[in-house]
């Protein structure tokens, strides 16, 4: 959904100093001194050598050119990069049905992502491509991308997608044939390649890197303007190890740019007593398996295999895996999607087509009876808001590549305007979400947050109420020496802003990081406040008892602040 | 009385509970009272291995045939099977598919009873304290885990104010054929 913006601000100002932290110049602990020295000496310059071809984030020299410069209030385009159709064995809808529903629920862009595999590669691609063309023609105000839910060799699933172009289908077809984990692990006798043990086994990992380099080479060769990959439901089975994220990011930094901060299947946790499936929110009910990373272990304090406030543990845990990636000073963005296969309380059931031999389930069958399922329509509950210069295929993808992305559940907010800038020497214009700015050592950095509260009801018929916004920040500690690092101990919630119960329209908060001594990053999240731990974090969702509408969050992508 | 280690051949990518059933079927007629699965990551691809405590006689060759892979009696060698046997004996790691008292825990039981009637040393709540009287709804499927010499049952809050094991018998199988 595009959002127009009014300026009926509620002003709430907060100015805070941060003492006794890593930003404190008085802190003479050896680690902090060394860290400051390191960042002063190498910082972004050291990072630049591995940044490769990410145009939005390349730093050839210091001070860095600001990335995502603040430019007033931009436009948000809501979308969903994870949608299935009858061309997935476990899904059912026509492409046009999904696109029509996405439009009905306010989305500007969608990505059709049926599961990769032998049958999909052989039979589905040639059917879905013309279906997507037709959907574009019948819904001219929705961008419909052709994509793939890629079985990442050695890991989970991922969205891969391209803008429409002469070579789009050819690239996707070649990509899937050569690099889909399902194709690679299926024996030759069954039409696959038989090259890896299992789709998720570690012998697939080199293929994943080659796959992403292949996509990047297609961009460099001019066969497509851009190609993007987002890791889907990353913690669900624990098979995306930290070194794999780092490997994907570093192999093709212009392509592998993020992950689902929140998985789809958000209706899965509705209690059976309320007519729901009584399963897990996000269908996150797994336990470690042989291909899981051993560091993702359920313990007395946490279960990485569950969602927290509907978000994946990797994103929801402050100082967790996502923060450990961001603390390297490198981009890695989060999104929210529907993963829509079969919609809760819709009356359709799967068609009777044999997907294995035709690549399609055939037309869905309308039973006339609401079905109890785990998914929502695209846009019904989960939105990925993307800031883009225009509603065009390439611009929206550039917005995603550049991290101008906010993941939103249940319309907890309508928009977010963030400005981070130097108040002293440095970048006084500042940057916005996904950006990179710089400040003279010892000077102040101002954060101005403007949140557009929901102006109307969400699709549960309720106008959601944002209760708080958390400002999360942590030091940039440089490239991880341990590629399997999964924590960022310096990252914390530095400030929580309460939203007044009476607030309407746009609320404004400010925060100043005083006398900044070292490079850091910051990010925002917000909650309806319904389900919080005693220290304000999201609560682990209970299997069979997780009404998604009663526990709404948004997560915004970070801003990096370099110190010169 | 002996500890065995094995590297079973596992058919396809099935759910863990399905694999457990196949493994336990191979133990038909073998008086094993403690059986764990382990993950051996010493090679390029992770392999599920198995350990078993057998108080009585066991025909190792027959068991190897049933499991479709090598079975060794506990030794100090560096083979995956031997590592599994030691991990089971020491309760160093692994997930336990058979243990003394398991058959008595098929309904809803206070946490204290879980510990009292079985080999489980502790009931550990994920993010919650577990009181001895807190009901644990086993759903007929318990897979406690070995950690640092203890057998722990990890539980989490469930519908109706009870606790349920963190490992479910039939977690969501992601389709798409893989």
Image: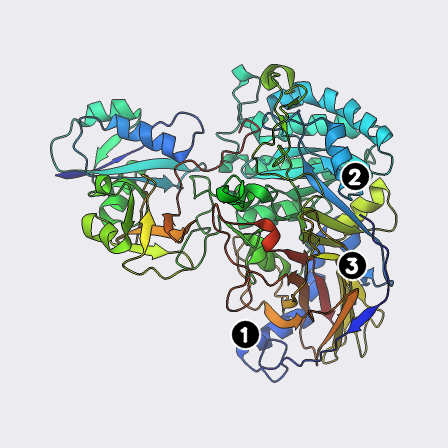
The image shows residue B136, relative to residue A365, as above or below, that is below
User: Which badge, 1 or 2, is on the more N-terminal residue?
Assistant: 1
Residue drawn at (57%, 22%) of the image: A193
Mark 2 surroundings within 10 Å by alpha-carbon count, few (fewer than 14), some (14 through 19), many (20 or more): many
Mark 3 residue crowding within 10 angstroms, few (<14) / some (14–19) / many (20+):
some
> In the rendered image, which residue does mark 3 sit on?
A60
Residue at the image point whose x is 67% and y is 47% from the top: A382
Choose the circle earlier in sequence order: 1 or 3: 1
Name the chain letter of the residue that bears numbered label 2.
Answer: A
Q: Is residue A42 left or right of residue A165?
A: left
Q: Nearer the viewer, mark 1 or mark 3?
A: 1
**x, y (%) of residue A99?**
76, 34
Residue A301 coordinates in the image, percent (x, y): 43, 60
Residue position marked by numbered label 1 in the rendering: A31
Task: Using the numbered discs, state the Cα–Cα distance from disc 1 to disc 2 in whole angstroms.
Answer: 52 Å
Residue A231's x, y, as percent?
A: 62, 43
Closer-to-camera residue (A202/A297): A297
- Tell whether A9 sits left or right of A213: right
Report the chain holding disc 1.
A
Residue in view at x 72 percent, y 48 percent: A384
Label 3: element kind: loop
Q: CA distance from mark 1 to mark 3?
A: 27 Å
Residues at marks 1 and 2 on the same chain: yes
Q: Residue furthest bottom?
A: A26
């Amino acid at each position: 959904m595009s959002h127009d913006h009014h300026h009926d601000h509620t002003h709430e100002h907060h100015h805070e100093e941060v003492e006794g932290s890593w930003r404190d110049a008085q802190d003479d602990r050896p680690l902090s001194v060394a860290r400051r020295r390191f960042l002063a000496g190498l910082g972004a310059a050291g990072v630049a050598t591995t940044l490769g071809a990410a145009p939005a984030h390349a730093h050839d020299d210091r001070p860095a050119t600001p990335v995502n410069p603040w430019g007033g209030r931009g436009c948000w385009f809501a979308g969903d990069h994870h949608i299935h159709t009858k061309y997935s064995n476990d899904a059912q809808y026509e492409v046009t049905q999904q696109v029509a529903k996405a439009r009905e629920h306010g989305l500007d862009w969608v990505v059709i992502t049926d599961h990769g595999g032998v049958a999909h590669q052989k039979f589905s691609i040639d059917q879905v491509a013309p279906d997507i063309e037709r959907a574009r023609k019948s819904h001219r105000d929705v961008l419909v991308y052709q994509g793939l839910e890629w079985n990442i060799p050695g890991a989970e699933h991922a969205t891969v997608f391209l803008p429409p172009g002469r070579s789009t289908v050819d690239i996707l077809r070649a990509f899937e044939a050569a690099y889909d984990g399902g194709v690679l692990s299926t024996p030759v006798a069954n039409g696959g390649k038989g090259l890896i043990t299992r789709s998720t086994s570690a012998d697939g990992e080199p293929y994943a890197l080659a796959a992403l380099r292949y996509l990047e080479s297609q961009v460099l060769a001019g066969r497509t303007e851009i190609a993007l990959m987002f890791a889907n439901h990353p913690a669900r089975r624990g098979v995306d190890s930290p070194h794999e994220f780092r490997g994907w990011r570093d192999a093709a930094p212009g392509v592998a740019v993020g992950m689902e901060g929140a998985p789809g299947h958000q209706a899965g946790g509705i209690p059976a007593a309320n007519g729901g499936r009584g399963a897990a929110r996000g269908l996150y009910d797994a336990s470690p398996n042989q291909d899981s990373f051993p560091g993702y272990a359920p313990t007395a304090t946490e279960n990485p295999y569950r969602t927290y406030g509907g978000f994946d543990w990797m994103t929801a845990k402050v100082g967790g895996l996502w923060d450990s990636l961001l603390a390297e000073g490198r981009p890695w963005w989060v999104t929210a999607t529907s993963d829509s296969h079969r919609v809760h309380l819709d009356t359709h059931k799967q068609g009777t087509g044999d997907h294995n031999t035709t690549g399609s389930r055939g037309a869905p069958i309308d039973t006339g009876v609401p079905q109890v399922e785990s998914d929502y329509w695209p846009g019904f509950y989960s939105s990925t808001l993307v800031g883009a210069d225009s509603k065009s295929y390439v611009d929206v993808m550039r917005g995603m590549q550049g991290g101008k992305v906010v993941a939103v559940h249940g319309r907890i907010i309508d928009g977010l305007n963030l400005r981070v800038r130097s108040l002293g020497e440095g970048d006084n214009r500042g940057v916005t979400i996904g950006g990179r700015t710089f400040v003279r050592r010892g000077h102040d950095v101002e954060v101005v947050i403007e949140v557009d509260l929901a102006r109307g009801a969400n699709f549960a018929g309720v106008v959601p109420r944002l209760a708080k916004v958390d400002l999360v920040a942590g030091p940039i500690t440089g490239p991880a020496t341990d590629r399997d690092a999964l924590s960022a101990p310096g990252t914390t919630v530095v400030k929580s802003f309460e939203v007044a119960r009476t607030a309407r329209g746009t609320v404004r908060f400010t925060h100043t990081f005083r006398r900044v001594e070292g490079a850091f990053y910051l990010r925002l999240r917000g909650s309806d406040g319904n389900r919080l731990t005693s220290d304000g974090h999201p609560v682990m969702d209970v299997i069979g008892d997780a009404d998604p509408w009663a526990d709404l969050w948004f997560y915004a992508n970070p801003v990096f602040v370099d110190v010169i | 009385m002996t500890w065995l280690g094995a590297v079973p051949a596992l058919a396809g990518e099935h759910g863990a509970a399905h694999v457990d059933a196949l493994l336990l079927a191979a133990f038909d007629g073998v008086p094993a009272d403690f059986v764990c699965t382990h993950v051996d990551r010493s090679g390029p691809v992770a392999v599920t291995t198995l350990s078993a405590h057998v108080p009585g006689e066991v025909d190792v060759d027959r068991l190897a045939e049933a499991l479709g892979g090598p079975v060794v009696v506990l030794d100090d060698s560096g083979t995956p099977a031997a590592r599994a046997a030691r991990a089971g004996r020491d309760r160093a790691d692994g997930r336990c598919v058979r243990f003394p008292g398991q058959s008595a825990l098929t309904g809803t039981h206070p946490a204290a009873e879980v510990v009292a009637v079985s080999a489980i040393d502790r009931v550990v709540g994920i993010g919650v304290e577990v009181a001895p009287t807190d009901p644990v709804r086993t759903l007929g499927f318990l897979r406690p885990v070995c950690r640092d010499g203890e057998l722990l049952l990890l539980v989490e809050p469930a519908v109706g104010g009870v606790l349920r094991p963190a490992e479910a018998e039939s977690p969501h199988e992601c389709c798409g054929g893989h």
